Amino acid sequence: MSTHPEHSARGTSSKEVETTDDAQTVLPVAETTAPEITRDQLSLSKRLLNWRTLVPLVVVLVALIFFAQKANINPQAIWEAIRRANLFLFLLAFGIYYLAMGIRVWRWRLLLENVGYTPKKGIKLPGFWKLAEILFISFFANVVVPAKLGDLYRAYLLGQEVPVSGTRSYGTVLAERLLDLTVLLLLFIPALLISLQEHLPPQLQLSLEIVLAAVVLGIAALIVLRLAREPIARLVPTRWRGHYYHFQEGTLGSFRRLPALGGLTVGVWVCEGLRFFFVALSLNLLSGNLTYLLAAAIVAGLAEALLTAVPATGGGLGVVEIGMIPILGLFYHGLDTVNRSTATILLDRTISLFSVLVFGLIVFLFAFGRKTTMQKKATLLKTTDNKPDSE
């Protein structure tokens, strides 16, 4: 008997089978009664007040204060630079950042459709704005707490809207991360060569090697996952085997329609580079011909993205600020380098960190309030329906 693939992840009492889209074979799905992703596991308040979140944050903030003192950072000089920034260019950078958000939503929908979340399979995905809401809340979660919890939260929230496997949905998020790393690397290398004339400093060379290793390992893991599906499944405990199948299909199944996915991913990272380009331009941080300016901005913008991937603090708070100073020093050689670079970083983080924190909180509270209201209405309606007639 063939059943819907999502059912096996939610618990079943009999052996089931599942057919993948890329093969005509029928594969056994292990019996499982374990829940997938629970709300309690993803509680932002519990994670935020957890010592694993607070201790790294305190350590990084202390390091940030120490670094600011050693580097002779002058808050007054920073404020003066920010006050004189070109408002139009800053707002342009702001708009480009949120344009990238829209592209991310379209790409995620494509990934979800690739793993079978289509009306033909009995699954109607939420509309663009609902997916955008889910994605933005996940970004908010990544800013609030470390370890990229928002990626799991995204899969959980989708499961609250449509009856799909959270494990498979999370597989699409991991596939998205691998696409990001691959395209980021392909943009990063030529931008480095153009902006630094092939004289790579040790810091950037090390970063490049780390990213390259991550991409190679990710691709190798996907190949192993595809070729050794069943041998790996036999190593997974029986109660988790259904989750493994969903994760494997969610990750590998995502890589259909690669040209479209690749184009959207390039669009995301071009927007990230342009965002930093216009922020730097608003402060007159960079100078030179247009090709050099774009290449330098792409390097700086993508380097910031790499630093946010460090799971020490939410949104890379502290890690990005400390790491970006020497990177910007590679391109800006004018007066007051440290303060001008710090002003640029703070202005850029106003967009990529603080705006997500503020708007994300609003969206989160709105979505939570709407959900609570709907649940109360449903409970009241159920109570009314169950009340006996007075007659």
Image (tube, rainbow, N blue to C red):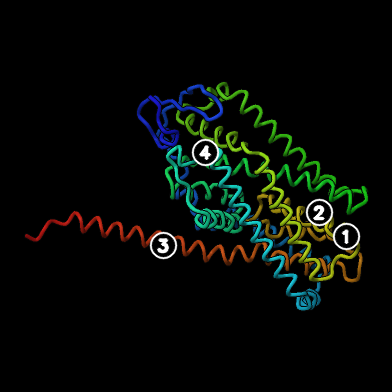
Q: Which of 339 and 10 lies nearest the eye of the viewer?
A: 10
In the shown orientation, is residue 371 left or right of residue 379? right
Callout 4, which amino acid? Arg
Q: Vertically, is 131 above or below 253?
A: below
Q: CA distance from mark 1 to mark 4?
A: 43 Å
Between disc 3 and disc 1, whose residue precedes? 1
Callout 3, which amino acid? Arg
Q: CA distance from mark 4 to mark 2?
A: 33 Å
Element at badge 4?
helix
Between disc 4 and disc 3, whose residue precedes? 4
User: Residue 93 shows which numbered tag?
Assistant: none
In the shown orientation, is residue 335 left or right of residue 48? right
Residue located beneath label 3 in the image: 370
List x then y, in percent, for residue 246. Answer: 51, 34
Mark 2 closeness class: few <14, some 14–19, many ≥20 residues within 10 Å = many
Callout 1, which amino acid? Phe
Mark 1 closeness class: few <14, some 14–19, many ≥20 residues within 10 Å = many
Residue located beneath label 1 in the image: 331
Between disc 4 and disc 2, whose residue precedes? 4
Q: CA distance from mark 3 to mark 1?
A: 47 Å
Q: Are marks 1 and 4 in contact (CB under 8 Å)?
A: no
List x then y, in percent, for residue 140. Answer: 57, 58
List x then y, in percent, for residue 176. Answer: 63, 44
Q: Quadrant of residue 287?
A: bottom right
Q: Are marks 4 and 2 in contact (CB under 8 Å)?
A: no
User: Residue 299 shows which numbered tag?
Assistant: 2
The N terminus lies in quadrant: top left
Mark 3 closeness class: few <14, some 14–19, many ≥20 residues within 10 Å = few
